[in-house]
């Protein structure tokens, strides 16, 4: 049985790790992820130890979160003890800390944030090299030659039977009236139905880059999906990265002296988030002035503020503002969501 690929990742990078796993599994490689494959009630640490020992190769999803994760360091040590090959992939442009430099100094990086599709293909080839096909794998079974008998007579007789059957089938088909062409309406409906797998891969890729501060990572989504579901949000994020917040302190749309929750206190303490809040508030006012359904826009804003206030760190808050700016952009384009 072909061994699995152990995906080592920070719990904060679950979305990008899932995208890497989906890219590998769509290319025929089975993966193991702690966030997905450890069942309720199982011993977490014991499951990870067994999975690393039984894996054929480890793929390390490296990021700023992984750079500061003690659990990742333990998994790297276990991989070293089990003599497992480690293939590091970078989800963002970050330099390894001293703790990781020793382990990863001789390994070749694969940067996923520059060209996702090309990097996924390269990673698949590395995994293919690390985990050779076994005799009982599906691919090996397909390629394994069939045993031949001592006499060629049964083979010849079978060949003749196939020819006769094929001739009879061809004769019968020529006697049948041609099938009516499919309804144009049905063809249009079928063409309009997107592939669920394709939609999931697109959503996974967007989730992995939408909060990145690297313009190349966001651009990799637009390069693959120029007219995708999240294209407007990606363009807005690129514009934000191309025009970084100035060092001049911008006050948020609410009073910092009256901040009532953790999210507002984090915004007030971060000049960049304060500027994002002010910019988002200005966009909202422009949309409200032209909205065909002002009450609908206001209800949407209230629901978003509730979601934003559940955040407790800058990454979550920044991602929340990016999503809201994209939503308001649709109101600005058409006057309705």
Image (tube, helix red, strand yellow):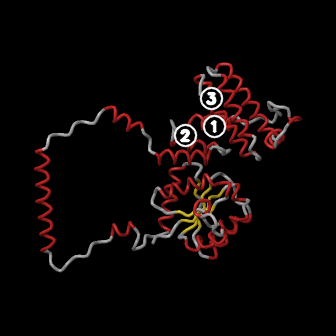
Q: Position of residue 93 (x, y in %)?
A: 66, 51
Q: Earlier in the sequence, mark 1 or mark 3?
A: 1
Q: Position of residue 262 (x, y in %)?
A: 81, 44
Quadrant for the C terminus in the image: top right
Q: Earlier in the sequence, mark 3 or mark 2?
A: 2
| Real-space CA distance between mark 1 and mark 3, rounded to the nearest whole angstrom | 14 Å
| Real-space CA distance between mark 2 and mark 1, rounded to the nearest whole angstrom | 10 Å
The furthest residue to the front: 41
Q: Earlier in the sequence, mark 2 or mark 1?
A: 2
Q: Nearer the viewer, residue 27 or 301?
A: 301
| Real-space CA distance between mark 3 and mark 2, rounded to the nearest whole angstrom | 17 Å
In the figure, 162 relative to 16: above or below? below
Q: Position of residue 246 (x, y in %)?
A: 77, 34
Residues packed near mark 2 inside 10 Å, few (<14), some (14 to 19) or many (20 plus): some
Q: Secondary structure at mark 3?
A: helix
Side (left or right) of 79 relative to 3: right
Task: Find disc 3 in the rendering and name its residue.
Answer: 329
Task: Find disc 2 in the rendering and name its residue.
Answer: 222
In the figure, 128 relative to 196: above or below? below
Task: Find disc 1 in the rendering and name its residue.
Answer: 238
Side (left or right) of 4 relative to 10: left
Q: Secondary structure at mark 2?
A: helix
- Marks 1 and 3: which is nearer the front? 3
Q: Position of residue 320 (x, y in %)?
A: 69, 40
Instruction: Give me the residue at 57% from left, 38% from top.
Output: 230
Residues packed near mark 1 inside 10 Å, few (<14), some (14 to 19) or many (20 plus): some
Side (left or right) of 65 relative to 158: right
């Amino acid at each position: 049985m072909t061994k699995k690929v152990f995906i080592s990742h920070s719990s904060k990078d679950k979305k990008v790790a899932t995208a890497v796993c989906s890219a590998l599994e769509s290319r025929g490689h089975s993966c193991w992820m702690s966030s997905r494959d450890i069942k309720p009630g199982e011993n977490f640490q014991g499951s990870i130890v067994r999975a690393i020992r039984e894996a054929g190769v480890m793929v390390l999803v490296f990021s700023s979160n992984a750079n500061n994760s003690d659990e990742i360091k333990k998994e790297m040590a276990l991989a070293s003890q089990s003599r497992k090959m480690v293939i590091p992939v970078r989800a963002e442009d970050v330099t390894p800390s001293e703790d990781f430099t020793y382990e990863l100094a001789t390994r070749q990086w694969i940067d996923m944030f520059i060209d996702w599709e090309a990097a996924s293909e390269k990673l698949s080839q590395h995994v293919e090299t690390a985990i050779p096909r076994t005799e009982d794998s599906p691919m090996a079974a397909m390629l394994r030659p069939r045993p031949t008998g001592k006499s060629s007579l049964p083979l010849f007789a079978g060949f003749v039977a196939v020819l006769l059957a094929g001739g009879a089938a061809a004769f019968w088909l020529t006697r049948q009236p041609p099938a009516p062409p499919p309804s144009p309406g049905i063809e249009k409906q079928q063409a309009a139905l997107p592939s669920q797998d394709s939609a999931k891969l697109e959503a996974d890729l967007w989730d992995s880059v939408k909060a990145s501060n690297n313009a190349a990572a966001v651009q990799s989504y637009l390069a693959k999906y120029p007219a995708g579901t999240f294209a407007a949000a990606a363009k807005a994020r690129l514009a934000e990265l191309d025009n970084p917040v100035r060092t001049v302190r911008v006050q948020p749309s609410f009073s910092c002296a009256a901040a009532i929750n953790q999210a507002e206190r984090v915004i007030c303490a971060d000049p960049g988030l304060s500027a994002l809040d002010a910019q988002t508030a200005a966009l909202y006012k422009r949309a409200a002035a032209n909205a065909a359904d002002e009450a609908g826009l206001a209800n949407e804003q209230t629901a978003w503020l509730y979601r934003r206030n559940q955040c407790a760190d800058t990454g979550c808050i920044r991602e929340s503002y990016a999503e809201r700016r994209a939503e308001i952009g649709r109101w600005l384009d058409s006057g309705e969501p």
